[in-house]
Image (spheres, grey):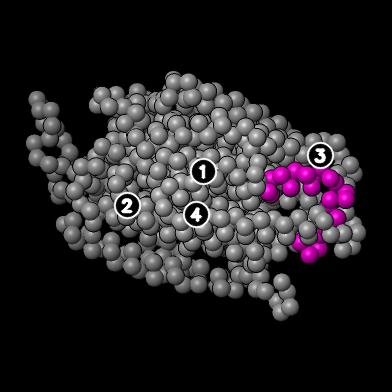
Amino acid sequence: MGWLLALPFLLPIATGLFALGARRKPRRARAISLLGCIGLFIVVVIIFVRVVDEGTIAAQMGNWPAPFGITLVADRLSAVMLLLAGLVGLVVAIFAQADVDLRREVLGFQGFYQLLLAGVCGSFVTGDLFNLYVWFEVMLIASFALLILGGERAQLDGGIKYVALNLVSTLFMLMAIGMVYGLTGTLNLAALHVALAEVDQPAALHMLAVLLIVAFGIKAALFPLYFWLPASYHVPPVAVTAVFAGLLTKVGVYALIRTFTLIFPADFSFAHDLLLIAALLTMLSGVIGAASQYEFRKILAFHIISQIGFLVLGLALFSPLALAGSIFYMVHNIVAKTNLLLISGTARRMTGSFNLAEIGGLYRVSPVLAAVFFIAAFSLAGFPPLSGFWAKLMLVTASLEQAAYWVAAVALITGALTLFSMSKIWSEAFWKPHPTGEVRSLTSLTVSERIQRMLPTVLLVAITLGLGLFPQPLIQFCETAARELLDPAGYVATVLPSRGG
Amino acid sequence: MESALVLVIGVMVAAGVYLMLASNLLCYLFGLILLSNAANLVIFVAGRLTRAVPPLIPKGQEAPLEPVANALPQAMILTAIVIGFGLLAFTLALVVACYRELGTIDSDHMRLAEPPPKRGEH
C-alpha cells in the first residue's frame, strides 16, 4: 500500500534525476521524461480508481504509526488533484517536445520539469504540515529554475519578482508551522483536526489563520498578494507557463481548502469571511486587469488570478454545494486554462508574436485551432453547455442558497468580463487579417511537430466538451468529495485508526 | 528565557520586513536572511526551552525525570536551514545574474517584463 501512494512523487524524482543526467543528449532526456510522465499518469489513474472504490486511503512511511511518522493520504480531493497533475504533466510534456528549444533542454529543462511534478504531487498526497512545506519548496525551487532557464533578460526580471514574493510566502508558512507545533505538539493534519479543536486560545488561532492565509494566498495568487503572477508568467517558454498555470497556483488553493476544512474548526467564520472578501476582490481585479492587457499570454495570466477567486469562493461559502462547485471548477479550470496557454503557444508559432496588435488571420489559416480556442475560451467564460457553465452554476446556486446575492452578482459580472477578454483575443488573433500577412499554416509544420502541438490541445478540448455534455458523474463525485471535506471524521479515522474515529 | 527570545524574534522580523521593503535587491537579500532565521527561531521556541537539562532518560525509567525541550523542532529547523540556505544561494546568484544582464539591482528600474505603457498605446 505504501508504495502506491509514494509513487506519485518517487517516480518523477527518479525520472528527473535520469533526465538531468542525460541532459546533454536531449533526445534521450526527452524520451525519459515522456516515459516518466506516462508512468506517472498510469499511477495517478490507479490511485484515483482505488480512492473512488474504497474511499480515503492512507500509508505510514517507514511503518511509524501516525502521528509520529510521515503520513501519505489520498482522499477524493487529493485523488482528483493527482489525476489532474498527471494529465497536465503528460500533455505539457508532449507539447514541450515541440515548444522548448534545444538550448534549454541541454540546460536541464526535462529534469526540472519532472522535479516540479514531484513537488506538486507530493503536496497533494502528504498528510503532514511540515512535509507539505518540504514539497512546496521542491516545487518552488524547480519552478524558479524553469522560470529563468535560458536566462533571457525579461526572464531574469520576471524571475526576481516571482522569487522575491514566493520566498516571503514560504517564510510565513514556516512561522505558522512553528506556532502550530507550539500550540498542539503535532503536525499531522488528521491529528491537528483533533488537537486544534481543543485549543482554547482564539487569539492564537486567529493569528495562525492569518499567517496561513497569507502564505497560501501568495502561492494561490489571491488579492492583494498576486502581483508576482502577471510580472512573471509571460516570460518563460509557453510550455512552462502552461504547467505553472495549470498546477502551481492550484496547489496553493488546494492547501487553503485542506487547512480550512481539515485542521481549523468548521465554525471558524473569521477565516471564511476573510477568504470571501479576498475571493471577490481577486475575481474582479483579475478580470479587470485582463481587460486592460493587449498581449495573448498576459490576458490569460490575469484570468488565472480571476479564476483563483472562484476556487476560493467555494471554500469561503463553506457549504457542501459550494465546495463541490469549487472542486468542479478546479477540474474545469485546469483543463481549459492549460489548453488556452498551449493554444497561445501554437498561435505564436504561426503568427510570430503574442502581441494581439501584431497578429491575426488564424481563423482563415487554421479553422481547427480556431475551433479548439473557441471551445476552451467559451468554456472559461462559462457558456452552456461547456464545462465552465456547470462550475459557475454550482457556485452561483450555492451563493444564492445562502442569500449572498451580491456574491452571485460579482460572479456573473466576472463571467461577463471574461467573455469580453476572450472575444478580444478571438477578434484580434483569429478573426482580423494578419497585419503583415505572414501567417504560417499548421500544414507547413513537420508532421511530428503538428502532432506534438495539436494532440495535447485536442485531448484537453475533448475533456472540456465531455465534462460539459456529461457533467453528472463529475458533479456526483465532487459532491461526495465535498461531503468528505466537511466531515473529516472518515479522513481522521483512516489516518489514526487507534482513535477509532 | 522564552520571552527574551520572542522579543529577539520580533525585532528580527521587524528589521527583516523593513529591509525587504527596499527596492535595492541587496537589502532585500539581507532582510530575507533575517526573516528566515527568525522563522527558524519561532520553531525553536515552539519546542520549549529548558536550560542545562539534557534529554536523557535514566536507567530503569521510561521518561525523563524533569521536563526537557522537545527535540523534534530542532530536527525540523535543520531541514528548514538547509532549504533556506539553498534558496538564499539561488536568490543571490539570481541577483548577481540580474546585475550583470540588466545593469541594476534596483527593482524599481527593472521594467523589462512589464514595460511602462507608452503614450498612445492601448
Q: Quadrant of the C terminus of chain A?
A: top left
Q: Earlier in the sequence, mark 3 or mark 1?
A: 1
Q: Amino acid at mark 2?
A: Ser
Front label number (3 vs 1): 1
Q: Which residue is mark 3?
A: A449
Marks 4 and 2: which is nearer the front?
4
Q: From this viewpoint, is residue A23 visible? A: no
Residue name at image x 38 percent, y 57 percent: A274
* Labels 3, 4: one chain: yes
Q: Residues within 10 Å of mark 3 (few under 14, many from 20)?
A: some
Q: Is residue A370 magenta?
A: yes
Front position among marks 3 and 4: 4
Q: Report the residue marked by disc 2.
A: A269
Residue A143 located left or right of residue A210: right
Residue denoted by label 1: A394
* Dot 3: element: helix
Q: Which residues are magenta?
A: A356-378
Q: Amino acid at mark 1?
A: Met
Tags 4 and 2 both on a single chain: yes
Q: Secondary structure at mark 2?
A: helix
Q: Residue at x 71, y 71 (%)?
A: B122
Q: Earlier in the sequence, mark 2 or mark 3?
A: 2
10 Å neighbourhood of mark 2: few (<14), some, or many (≥20)?
few
Answer yes or no: are tags 2 and 3 on the same subunit: yes
N-terminal of the pair, mark 4 or mark 2, is 2
- Near-viewer residue (A254 or A59): A254
Q: Are marks 3 and 1 on the same chain?
A: yes
* Chain to which mark 2 belongs: A
